[in-house]
Amino acid sequence: MLKGNLIIKNAAQLVTCSGFKAKSGSEMADLHLIEDGALIAENGRIRAVGRTADILQGVDATGFTVIDAAAKAVLPGFVDSHTHFIFGGYRAEEYAWRLRGDSYMEIMQRGGGIISTVAATRGAGLDELVASGRRRLDAMLSFGVTTVEGKSGYGLDRDTEIRQLEAMRVLSGCHPLDIVPTFLGAHALPPDYKDREEAFIDFMMATVLPVVAESGLAEFCDVFCEKNVFSIAQSRRLLLKARKLGLKLKLHADEIVPLGGAELAAELGAVSADHLLQASDRGIDDIARAGVVATLLPGTAFSLKAPYARARVMIDRGCAVALASDFNPGSCFSESIPLIFALSVLNMEIGIEEAVTAMTINGAAALDRADTIGSIDPGKQADLIVLEFPSYAFIPYHIGVSTVEKVIKRGTIVFDKTRHEERDDVC
Ligand code: NIG
Ligand code: FE
């Protein structure tokens, strides 16, 4: 069997999500589904896609792994385009405080929240960050994620920010998941910069950002643009510099209050604007017009008991919406993709088809990778999932439980729920 050579045949549904760019508005509901579908992948790339009877006629399967996907649905691997998966320590006590009624921002303002993870991350060595990161990536993979974005932002100093990005580089070299690294140096104000936000932005611009850009350790730059964190003007200043240094842009925008983050993301031509729980009508129209992907994170609204982003309005006004986990130790400590699906269709008026588009091709677009991943199209990377069930409709229906049987990365099976090598049960 040659690595990366794969044939999938007889799929009850081949959910192709076909396309090479973000899908916006009504396009999001069309999954370009093929019944009794098949595909051929060679050297990790998809070569042919169609009905089994049409594309497998006369094909010699020697040297190919063959999956018979009868009674199963096959989809592109999920793209989780917003996570903070490299961090030290945990914040379980904070979760209990929130249940008691303390708000996320109150906890942050009294030195907990992000700042407490910053202390733990500063104290964690590279090996420790790699080891915990690897376990989290394994969990993501089991949920069908084949590409993940990860942010720094728990260092807020030069060395720790770089160490977080280095941990992602190490993991990129040894884990099947593809990792897209984002520099989020302006994630919070460290205590030694109290009331000196401008000075902290200056420090990031002069001392950290150039090292990040020169080393190629990050592809994107992001800022937590929020009341009592970083203002619109401060975010703009840092992002303009990042853009000049060749980084692409993302923005934590309008999460807690409607500050104008969506408008800023549109003004700067960011690849995505994320959260958007409080985005204004104008902000929504601006990102729709500018082609900024609206990355929505329902797990965070759920965990913080905050109102969900207005996904229906966004899609109806022509936005391209992506869904992501926002996995992090504070506002959403969950890698669960099935949870994200269930929350989005039950609470955000997103159709099941739209949710699938949002987790695949639009997730890829949120990482500027819609030309290479996120759909089952000839020429794309063979990143795929096989479900235990015959239809994509089972993903949110089986609430909170993963329906993913196999995960394929570049044409090779990297997760298989049906293999139990270490077990000796015979049933
Ligand atoms: O996306 N909002 C800011 N940052 C993260 C939370 C990080 C944390 O609480 O550790 C978010 O929700
Ligand atoms: Fe986030």
Image (spheres, helix red, strand yellow):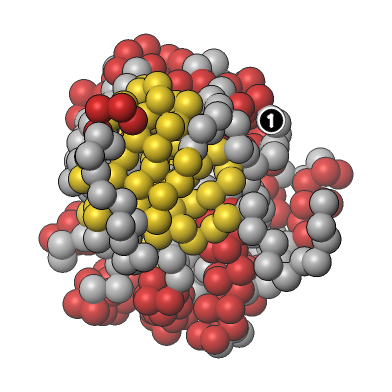
Q: Residues within 10 Å of mark 1 (few under 14, many from 20)?
A: some
Viewer-proximal residue among 35 and 22? 35
Q: Report if residue 6 is visible in the image.
A: yes
Which quadrant of the figure contains the N terminus? bottom left
Residue in view at x 73 percent, y 70 percent: 422
| Left or right, 182 with reference to 267 | right
Count how many numbered circles sit on residues in the image. 1
Whether 161 is drawn above or below 12: the answer is below
Viewer-proximal residue among 222 and 312? 312
Whether 282 is drawn above or below 426: the answer is above
Residue in view at x 32 percent, y 66 percent: 2
**Residue 244 image offset from top left, x and y in percent:** 13, 60
**Residue 71 image offset from top left, x and y in percent:** 55, 29
Residue 304: name its quadrant: top right
| Left or right, 192 with reference to 359 | right
Residue in view at x 54 percent, y 16 percent: 349
Residue 395: name its quadrant: top right
What is the secondary structure assignment of the residue under circle 1?
A: loop
**Residue 120 image offset from top left, x and y in percent:** 64, 76
**Residue 204 image offset from top left, x and y in percent:** 33, 70
| Left or right, 330 with reference to 258 | right
Whether 356 is drawn above or below 164: the answer is above
Q: Amino acid at mark 1?
A: His
Residue in view at x 48 percent, y 26 percent: 12
The residue that mark 1 highlights is 398
Whether 295 is drawn above or below 331: the answer is above
